[in-house]
Each structure stands twice: as structure tokens, then as C-alpha cells.
Amino acid sequence: MRQANVIKGDIFFQWKYGFYLLYILCILVYMIIFSFFEGNLKNIIVACCVYSDPAAMGMFFMGALILLEKSQHVTSSIVISPVTPTQYIVGKVLSFAPISEIVGLILIIFGHTANVLLFMVGILLGSAIFSLCGIIVGTMVSNLNQYILGTVPFELVGFAPVIAYRAGVFWDNPLMLIHPGCAAMQLLEGNANMAFLSIISLVIWTYVIYRIADKCVKKMYQQVGE
């Protein structure tokens, strides 16, 4: 019950501060961009945009959410409440997952995927990973400028190899699935041949990054409690 309340609280906070309106604006911008392309190039661009939604927007909104909580002393209230670091993290990740799925399903109408179920799994795991990265950076900074600078390495590592990969660079090489972004892209494309390895890769990365996020949140709890 407590976990459900944490998730509902995060969703309400996102709604209150217009996060969903920004997502709608992003969808409209994406639709305008898609209208300029056709054929396979359009499919590649759509796939990259679907991937970038939980990556770029998810990380940015996660940071904004955590910084808003800090500025309004919501974090202080959370720390003295029974909410555990694990519940805090799960609440943040799961509150962003539904909107990522909805946006992804809307955008893929303009592109192509061979398997909608794998596509949704790819969005879910990709959203979780980048949300966790956002939590890691968000708990370590105190203002937006610091957050933007802190996310640059994550964005570079998370985007550049994946865009090249989707463009055809080593597309059939299973070793590329070690990179979580490449694994997510295979699922977004609905590639059943790479599905098992892709899911395994993403699950492992999700666990590893969760452990790091857990340590960061615990440290934030200690600092706020001092």
C-alpha cells in the first residue's frame, strides 16, 4: 500500500507541475519532424525518437522532479517518513514508465516495429535504466545547471553509439547488445532473434544501475537527515 501511495504521489506531482503537458508538446514536435521524411529513413528516425524519449526526456524530467522536491523540502518530509530508499526509487521509476509507454506507442504509429510486445518491453526497460541514471545524478546535485552538466556523460554514452548502431553500424553483431541502448533498440525494432540476449542485457544493466542509485539515495537520506 505504501509503495502504491508513493507512485500515486509522484504521478500527482508530475501532473501538478505540467510534466504531461510537456510530453504532449514533445509528441507534436516529433510528429512535425516525422512529416518531413519517408521510407526507411523515417523508420530509423522514429525508432531513434522513441528511444530518446525515455532517455533524454525521462532523465531531464527525473532531474527536474527531484530538484523540485528538494527546493520545496519534500525530500525532507520523505526522509522522516516510513518510505524506504527502495520505495523512493521504485516510485520514481514506475511513475514515469506509463507515460513513456504511451508516448512510445503513439510515436510508433509513424514508424514500424515487428513485435509490439517486445517494443513495449524495450520501452519499459529503457525507461527504467535512464530514470535510474536520472536519480543518480539528481540526488548528487543541488541546481539545474549542475544536473544538466551531470547528465552529459550519460547522454553521450547512451545516445551516440545507439544512433550509429541503428543506422547499420554492427547491427547484426550480438556483442553490441552489451550496450543497453543497443539492446533496447533491438527490442524497439521487435527483433525476436535478438530478444533473449537483449532482455538479459537490459535486466543486468537495470540491476547494476539500481544498486548504484540505491547507494546515492541512501546518501541523500543521510545528508538531508543531518
Image: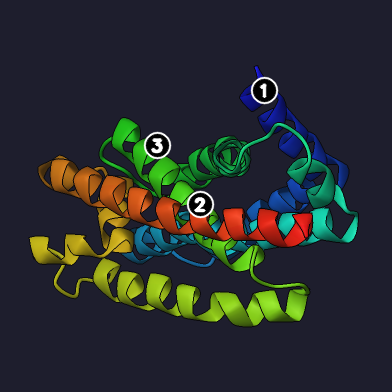
1 or 3: mark nearer the eye: 1
Locate residue 209 relative to residue 27 in the image: left or right: left
Rendered image quadrant of residue 62: bottom right
Q: Is residue 189 visible?
A: no
| Residue on which disc 2 sits | 214
Q: Which residue shows up at 79% across the image and 50% down it?
A: 75
Q: Position of residue 219 (x, y in %)?
A: 61, 60
**Tag of residue 120:** 3
| Picture quarter with the N terminus | top right
Q: Amino acid at mark 2?
A: Asp
Tell me how far mark 3 sits from mark 2, CA to CA: 25 Å
- Mark 1 or 3 closer to N-term? 1
Q: Position of residue 33 (x, y in %)?
A: 57, 65
Q: Secondary structure at mark 2?
A: helix
Q: Crowding at label 2, few (<14), some or many (≥20) Cα neighbours within 10 Å?
A: some
Q: Answer above or below: position of 1 versus 7.
A: above
Q: Position of residue 149 (x, y in %)?
A: 62, 83
Q: Which residue shows up at 74% across the image and 54% down it?
A: 65
Q: Amino acid at mark 3?
A: Met
Q: Which residue shows up at 29% across the image and 76% down it?
A: 164
Tell me how far mark 1 sits from mark 2, CA to CA: 18 Å
Q: Secondary structure at mark 1?
A: helix
| Picture quarter with the C terminus | bottom right
| Residue on which disc 1 sits | 2
Q: Which residue shows up at 73% across the image and 38% down it?
A: 10
Locate residue 87 relative to residue 145 in the image: left or right: left
**Tag of residue 22:** none
Q: Is residue 159 visible?
A: yes
